[in-house]
Amino acid sequence: MLNELSYREIYAAVTECKGADFKIQKLKIREPIGDEVLVKIVATGMCHTDLIVRDQYYPVPLPAVLGHEGAGIIEAIGPQVKSLSVGDHVVLSYGYCGSCTHCLSGNLTYCEEAFVRNFGGKDQNGCNAICTHDHVGVNDHFFSQSSFATYAISRENNAVKVCKDVPLEILGPLGCGIQTGAGTVINALNVRPGSSFLTWGAGAVGLSAVLAAKVCGATTIIAVDIVESRLALAKEMGATHVVNSKEQNPIEVIKQITNGGVNFALESTGRPEVISNGVEALGTLGKIAVVGAPRLGVKAEFDVNNLLLNGKTIMGVIEGNCNSKWFIPQLVELYKQGRFPFDKLIKFYSLDDINQAALDSERGITLKPVIRIA
């Protein structure tokens, strides 16, 4: 089948093996079929998930083209596409089938085929869109896009049309990291006006949550981290209190600030001891959403009676429980109104500097690297 399709040349950052640097390679990508769209990528955010997949926390087959916060312009569409056109500006988000029980009930992020469509290395039919010049398939369709490349194949349902009066180069992170932080606050936790909110971790996800908590009207907003520059930015973006957990006992400080415990919390570090602290720092009927992804099999501990007697809730949240088609345009509108300045988190890199972007992200130097492609 590979040889029967029409292809165009692309450049892509390939992850060849566990822990390896990204390698820029000249490859080919086929034209869209069915409900697919071909997107010329303008810029792509780099997310924690790209790095943990590179390091094989999740069993994504390698070599692969990763990247899952793409933004670009549609250059071609498949014959079944109805709602998108050539020339549309789009943000690419996660993949889902649209027809399973969870999708039909509106819980798209918990699609029964989510792992296969986002981490399987091929499309839903077991095929690759990207190949070498010898027509050897390369693992792709990462989050139904693989956008560390000059072009990406996506599907109509996870390509989100956005307005053309906001620069595309900043919008890619809305497809995953930013919508995870903001969506968890707005959709999953349902943070209320006048309430208290806490983020464990002041990276891109945590600070997006701070912005969203402010939009929701939380009046006590706390950020916990160990990097002073991140805590300073948290204050700038709306945190009323910051805690350096290397220098202070965060649970004691949080309970003092909130008079007993916080109403809502988000945990984005993926560290089990932080999850345990997060449960401890909740007030009565408090809720904590866990969004940070550790290695498979990592376990956290908590006091069952502390959970039970205080009516606390621990929830796992994927992609902020967002329907991206609806939620991403809302975040763009908030940005246009000056109420959601997520661009303050971004630092740009060229495709050739993608490994430096990864290193800066891991060292905490850069909150949200964005790789300029076009």
Image (cartoon, grey):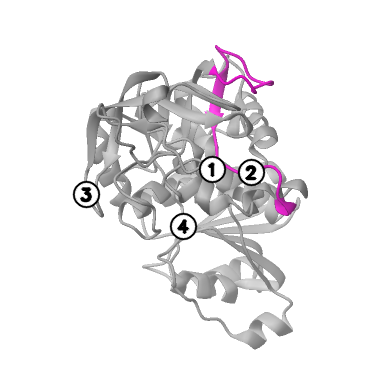
Q: Position of residue 127 (x, y in %)?
A: 45, 39
Q: Which mark is residue 124?
A: 1
Check disc 3 and give the amino acid type: Ala
Q: Residue at x 69, y 74 (%)?
A: 312
Query: Label 3's element?
Result: loop
Badge 4, how many Cα within 10 Å: few under 14, some, many 20+? many
N-terminal label among 1 and 4: 1
- For residue 95: magenta? yes
N-terminal label among 2 and 4: 2
Relative to 3, residue 136 above or below: below
Q: Position of residue 179 (x, y in %)?
A: 58, 42
Camera-side residue: 151 or 209? 151
Front disc: 1 or 3: 1
The answer for how far apart the CA atoms under marks 2 and 4 are is: 32 Å
Q: Which residue is mark 3?
A: 20
Cβ–Cβ below 8 Å for labels 2 and 4? Answer: no
